[in-house]
Amino acid sequence: MTRILAQTKSASVNPLKSSQPLGAALAFLGIDGAVPLFHGTQGCTSFALVLFVRHFKETIPLQTTAMDEVTTILGGSDNLEEAILNLKTRTKPKLIGVCTTALVETRGEDSAGDIADIRLKRAEELAGTEIVLANTPDFSGALEEGWAKAVTAMIEGITRPGERARQSKKIAILPGWNLTVADIEHLREMVESFGLHPVILPDLSGSLDGTVPDHWVPTTYGGTSVEDIRELGAAEHCIAIGEHMRRPAKVLHKVTGVPYVLFESLTGLKDADQFASLLSTISGEPVPAGVCRRRAQLQDALLDGHFHFGGKKIAIAAEPDQLYQYATFFVDMGSEIAAAVTTTDMSEILEKVPAESIQIGDLGDLETLAGGADLLVTHSHGRQASQRLGIPLMRVGFPVFDRLGSQHKLSILYQGTRDLVFEVANMFQADRHAPTPEELDPFRKRETPGGPRSSPLTRH
């Protein structure tokens, strides 16, 4: 059984974790016509905005209630109301996603009550705009929990409750935060290839896919529509991806009765097979020829690539579900998890990670534990540890700001797993060092007892 080692340091040396509000804002960015609103100071919002812009290289519509010293003492309900009304007037959003920060959570503000009062007083002015609250204190959990809380809040606040007439081809998909734009696009294409209609919540592939609109849009553009969220109860099935999406799936089932299936990961041949089998069962259709072809390509990639993985030691630092995703991939390829570091102990998936122990900590802990590893796997903040240790770095997760195209990197199902095999195998090959004569022949410089000592100038 995997041992979970609690964090003992009083300070973070090189941060691994991103906060809950940032995770919630990321989920709201996957909704069409949305604006995430941080309820707190300007500094909290500015820091998150910088991370988003550096990672996605896109314009991010992130706003703040801009609490100051006075409102911190007297309460921020007026700031919240003013911010919501200003956003409604200036940007006309279809959804305002309110993410609480440590300031209002520590103060104990009743944000839910404040929003209910604002809705009641300003019903006419706010018509046509949904307001969803995600309670996301910075001091608890991490990005993963914030994403899940935002999705749960949207289902609870927008989806019509009660049993509905099921649409036989409609599938609700709740992707985890660790699925990239490319992952979600590929996921949709595969579901559609079975003749099914997927509704993905949230859908970052529609809003953060790198396209440029022909006119200025002050909100998100593309993504899941509010109407699609409202009609999720008409789906025949729900597929959740990642342990942190279990609660949103349970809430959808409780509110609408839609049954759900949870995949802990979609990376690897076994998980991709199970996913394709499920889609075939739901649709009543055989697996399409194109999907079979990609499966055959993955089999060939596994055959070609496994020689480079065998016996390699991997050090990973990531959010719990992403840690599980990559750790299982490497172990299935014949590698060993030499070090595993994660952000929080709140996820049950940690018990299934194929590692002897998991340290709750930061990238300083990863650097301490990764000595002798062949590969580091974490986000861009791990580049200093990579340089100091002389170990190559595979960039995954959030944020990745020193490489282009991180959101177009595919890592799931047959094609994504194939791409991962090639990427990692090529990194191992690029880092391979030619053996020295001494390594090839350890007896080359052996001295015989009583024999003459060879001169250091002697040529062999």
Image (cartoon, rainbow, N blue to C red):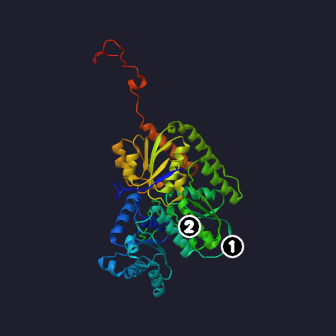
Mark 2 and 1 residues: CB-CB less than 8 Å, in contact? no
On the rendered image, what quadrant is the C terminus found in? top left
Residue 338 position within the rendered picture, expressed as x and y whole percent measured from the top left: 46, 44
Which of these two is toward me, 14 or 130? 14
Decide: few, some or many residues near mark 1? Use Cα within 10 Å; few <14, some 14-19, many ≥20: few
Decide: few, some or many residues near mark 2? Use Cα within 10 Å; few <14, some 14-19, many ≥20: many
| Mark 2 vs mark 1, CA separation in Å | 21 Å
Which of these two is toward me, 47 or 197? 47
Residue 43 has which mark? none
Q: Residue furthest right?
A: 284
- Judged by depth in the image, the label closer to the viewer, 2 or 1, is 2
User: Looking at the image, can residue 31 be seen?
Assistant: no
In the picture of the structure, the residue carrying the numbered disc 2 is 248
Mark 2 residue element? helix
Q: Position of 358 compared to 389: left or right?
A: right
Residue 119 position within the rendered picture, expressed as x and y whole percent measured from the top left: 48, 83
Mark 1 residue element? loop
In the picture of the structure, the residue carrying the numbered disc 1 is 165
Q: Amino acid at mark 1?
A: Ala
Q: Position of 340 compared to 458: left or right?
A: right
Looking at the image, which residue is at 41% across and 61% down? Answer: 18
Label located before the other in sequence (2 or 1): 1
Residue 231 position within the rendered picture, expressed as x and y whole percent measured from the top left: 60, 73
Q: Is residue 109 above or below residue 330?
A: below
Q: Is residue 357 above or below residue 70?
A: above
Q: Quadrant of residue 333 in the image?
A: top right
Residue 438 position within the rendered picture, expressed as x and y whole percent measured from the top left: 38, 24
Q: Amino acid at mark 2?
A: Pro
Q: Position of 279 compared to 456: left or right?
A: right
User: Looking at the image, can residue 248 be seen?
Assistant: yes
Q: Is residue 338 above or below residue 187?
A: above
Which of these two is toward me, 56 or 152? 152
